[in-house]
Image: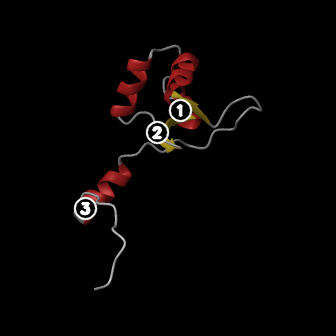
Amino acid sequence: MTTQALQPKSPILPNASRSAARRSRVSAPPVALAKDEPLGYRINDAGRAAGIGRTSIYKLIAEGKLEVVKVAGRSIIVGASLRALFDVSR
């Protein structure tokens, strides 16, 4: 009997659903950074920078208006997507 490493289970999606899931992510255009602007924000810091609360940040994430990456188990909001959110309103 041979032993195999168990692969983590992921939901099986048809090819169309996979590509739709990839397209649903927010891709912010490249934005020139000032020296003091961070690449990403923690949830509380993003709310503070935007002048809104945590609940509003989570709502924007759920709506797909903010891009989030997981780093070491922590949700980091991509700084470019936060800036792009406010650039649209101009």
Q: Earlier in the sequence, mark 3 or mark 1?
A: 3
Check disc 3: other Cα within 10 Å, few if <14, some if 14-19, many if 20+. few
Between circles 3 and 2, the one closer to the viewer is: 2
Q: Residue at x 49, y 23 (%)?
A: 89
According to the picture, the residue beneath numbered tag 3 turns out to be 16
Viewer-nearest of labels 1 and 2?
2
Q: Where is residue 24 in the image (x, y as percent from the top left)?
A: 35, 46
N-terminal label among 3 and 2:
3
Residue 10 percent location from the top left of the image: 29, 58
Residue 90 at least partly seen: no
Which of 11 and 21 lies nearest the eye of the viewer?
11
Farthest right residue?
Answer: 35
The residues bearing labels 3 and 2 have C-alpha atoms spaced at a distance of 22 Å
Callout 3 touching callout 2 (CB < 8 Å): no
What residue is pinned by disc 2?
Answer: 67
Kindly tell me whether residue 77 is visible in this rendering: yes
Question: Amino acid type of disc 2?
Answer: Glu
Q: Mark 1 points at which residue?
A: 84
Residue 21 at x, y = what percent? 32, 52
